[in-house]
Image (spheres, coloured by chain):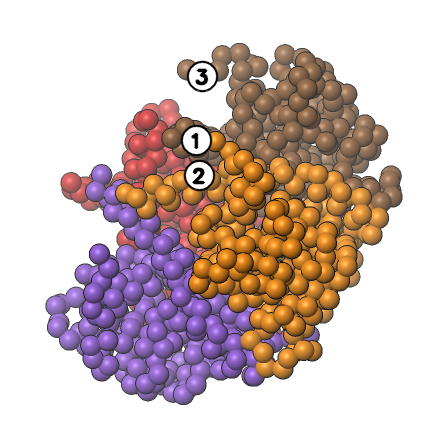
Chain colours: A brown, B red, C purple, D orange
Amino acid sequence: MPPQTPYETAISDLVVANRILAAEGVLDGFGHVSMRDPRDGACYLMSRSLAPALVTAADILQHDLDNHAVHDQGHSLYYERWIHGEIYKARGDVNAIVHSHSPTVVPFASTKAPLRPILHNASFLGFGTPVFEIRNFIPNSDLMISTAALGKALADALGPTAEVVLLRGHGNVVVGPSIRVAVFRAYYTEINARQQLNAMILGPNDVVYMNAGECETTDKIMQAVAGRPWDLWKRKVRREMRRAEIEDKS
Amino acid sequence: MPPQTPYETAISDLVVANRILAAEGVLDGFGHVSMRDPRDGACYLMSRSLAPALVTAADILQHDLDNHAVHDQGHSLYYERWIHGEIYKARGDVNAIVHSHSPTVVPFASTKAPLRPILHNASFLGFGTPVFEIRNFIPNSDLMISTAALGKALADALGPTAEVVLLRGHGNVVVGPSIRVAVFRAYYTEINARQQLNAMILGPNDVVYMNAGECETTDKIMQAVAGRPWDLWKRKVRREMRRAEIEDKS
Amino acid sequence: MPPQTPYETAISDLVVANRILAAEGVLDGFGHVSMRDPRDGACYLMSRSLAPALVTAADILQHDLDNHAVHDQGHSLYYERWIHGEIYKARGDVNAIVHSHSPTVVPFASTKAPLRPILHNASFLGFGTPVFEIRNFIPNSDLMISTAALGKALADALGPTAEVVLLRGHGNVVVGPSIRVAVFRAYYTEINARQQLNAMILGPNDVVYMNAGECETTDKIMQAVAGRPWDLWKRKVRREMRRAEIEDKS
Amino acid sequence: MPPQTPYETAISDLVVANRILAAEGVLDGFGHVSMRDPRDGACYLMSRSLAPALVTAADILQHDLDNHAVHDQGHSLYYERWIHGEIYKARGDVNAIVHSHSPTVVPFASTKAPLRPILHNASFLGFGTPVFEIRNFIPNSDLMISTAALGKALADALGPTAEVVLLRGHGNVVVGPSIRVAVFRAYYTEINARQQLNAMILGPNDVVYMNAGECETTDKIMQAVAGRPWDLWKRKVRREMRRAEIEDKS
């Protein structure tokens, strides 16, 4: 029987989102995924501190926008949860956030080469791909967004329209109006990075990127079809989860 | 018991083709594969709008060359089905078409570097690898072939002899006289792209490509042996399909 | 119970070698592996024409050095079997041969960048990596070694000491004194190609390759330890074979 | 029931470490992992000579710091075990060592491009990434650390503070205060190498690396969280081990 309430659906989707992004190589042992709480927009749902591939429904905790677990159960929380609260505060249009160390995006975060849309699925990159340089705020840091002030600075760097912000030496944050769209975008940010890197090898000075008008038009379509890969990925991770469950019992 | 009629064989082959290209990384959640209908050359067979890895026999619909489902059952159809009808109209020699976002081909579609045959299996690239630039037809588009006019323009770009056409910012379309040859070509288009990219790193100015005579000779042989990898891939996807079926039941 | 006679061991090893090289991505649907017949050095053992990943003991045929099946059973034979007979004739030290389209080696075959040993496991590359250009023998060919004359020309290109010869636009041939060593070398030829490509990106003019003395010393050790990865790979393919057998029965 | 004594835990962890690094592509058929013996700091634990993916608890032998098996049971030992004894002698802070041929690190070992920290997880690279050139000690060697003198020279190259030393034409050695941290570092050395290579393609002259202060701060955090990916990887290899066990019995 499928989940019944919007909250139950959200929990289920959030578990699946964690598993999808781990299975597709966007997340490794680190990173996290959150959703705005459908019961209360001033809260968000996210796992306790755990490798994304291991997240289950029981691990999801309600956080307020100051990044406290609402019903504190003594669980340790993600060290970088400040990313989430500050972006949800600043961006009313955002209902889901992925923070990853997506491997091919890091090189773009650490050079002057801007990440730009080369593949239609990644049209949202046309709305901006700012790079957050933590050194401008703290010298000799651990590069992590571990305070409210850093979370706020990161949200400022993301700004009002970008859907992705890169973190130098660290990773990226992708946002979306729904969990499906955020997962879609996190995946295609990595794919676009690989394709752009290859294009820059083929012809550093003659890559044709999508222009602003194309990005505007295409992103609408992509949001509309984001459910298609979601359904495919979900089926795959469901099988993996069932197999693991059976094996862990045996 | 094996399928009996040419139509039943076609349906079975088309399902397998979808699964092969998804398993081999040519197709992801998007893209589509079609075959000319063996019962009526003025129609083609293709799945309803669905991720290729999920296509089953029950999803295959007969489309006419104007890209309508012949027996309209209210299913949603692929948004870019116009690719198929217009190419089948223009090219009597074509009996199967693959549209993919094959990852290493996109960089060739978005730079001036022409995709050229470096591997004997990809000799068909010697017959031309035109790039379709949708901006020449529509500004600020979603890059997709979503009208008959765009389908026609794409078929014109493919022309009378090429077996591949690249779509800037988007992907490619590969054609063949049979589903086996089209799948073979879609696979080796991706493989050739990877090898050519690497060759261009090793020696940008001294890559030796296959010449026209070699391509002519080699393509004949490759068409003759395209069944060998097909049999291998088919066995693999059959196992995957059976495993998924068992797991989904349990 | 393990195979008993040297011939039975050879058949078993040859099946395993095919499966290993397919599983490790050295062979795809094409390519072939042979061993000199332990019962008669003027013959060799090789599968009938079949994708390497599907080869079983029942598919292995004895070929004479003129590349005829000794006990002709009407099976179709590999189109390029001439590679094998001519090399066995020319090189008494060679007891096993792998012909593959190993993906990262093709770019070296089609540019002026010589494949050179950068990794100790690939020290045998120090004995030469000639490139065979079929255009010097036949214009407008299908690039394949499909006659005795081409087989002879390829064996000449390999020469008396090299363990690898590259075929422009096509692939490579690796030889060894035993099937384990030939498989080891085919695998590490691919690995070395990837690492050399990356090194040439990092510093095109300052890559330190192994020198002749190092290659001489190291190849002896590598031949002595070639059984270690063989045992590992064998265990893996045995499991795959058993799993496929069970699934194909169910 | 979990292991009880520190020694039993060590054995279990060491088996898991071997399997993790093989599963994650850091180790192939070669390489080895050791831990300082928790019962006696003047000894270390390491497998007999065996492919890492096959190591079981029964294969672990106690070695003294002169690299003899303490209870000699006639097993053959790793040819390069000298790496371990000499580093444990020189570095009291080191309790675990990984020697691998991690594929993307070799190109850095064989060019003048220094491996540098581009990803926060690899902050330990900021403590130095010296390259050991065996030619400075032995001409025409097999590149391997096969004597106490070479082990000593390698330990000298590593020096008092670096956590990684690269071996030209061969591989690398990573050290840590615990097996979890050493495994974490071996994994992220490979990941960093891939990301740095890509960054050097994007902008050879403008890559922003982590600075000394950032590395100092970040490494502390990374050591604290190294258990998170360990738990994830361990769960995965446990399942693989159980599956293999079942299959090998059937």
User: Badge 2: how crowded within 10 Å, few (<14), some, or many (20+)?
Assistant: some
Quadrant of residue A190 within the rendered picture = top right
- Where's the C terminus of chain B, which quadrant? top left
Quadrant of residue D156 within the rendered picture = bottom right
Task: Pinpoint the chain carrying mark 3.
Answer: A
The alpha-carbon separation of the residues under discs 3 and 1 comes to 24 Å
Mark 1: amino acid: Asp
The alpha-carbon separation of the residues under discs 3 and 2 comes to 28 Å
Sooner in the amino-acid sequence: mark 3 or mark 1:
3
> Dot 2 corresponds to which residue?
D239
Nearer to us: label 3 or label 2: 2
A182 relative to C191 in the view: left or right: right
- Nearer to us in this view, C104 or A239: A239
Task: Pinpoint the chain carrying mark 2.
Answer: D
Residue C203 picture location, percent across and down = 68, 70
- Is residue C8 at least partly visible in the picture? yes
Q: Kindly state the secondary structure of the residue where label 1 is placed.
A: helix
> Dot 3 corresponds to which residue?
A2
Residue at 56% x, 53% y: name it. Answer: D45
Residue B114 picture location, percent across and down = 55, 63
Task: Report if the CB atoms under discs 1 and 2 are less than 8 Å apart.
Answer: yes
- Is residue D106 at least partly visible in the picture? no
- Nearer to us in this view, C36 or A120: C36
Mark 2: amino acid: Arg
What label does residue A248 carry, if any?
Answer: 1
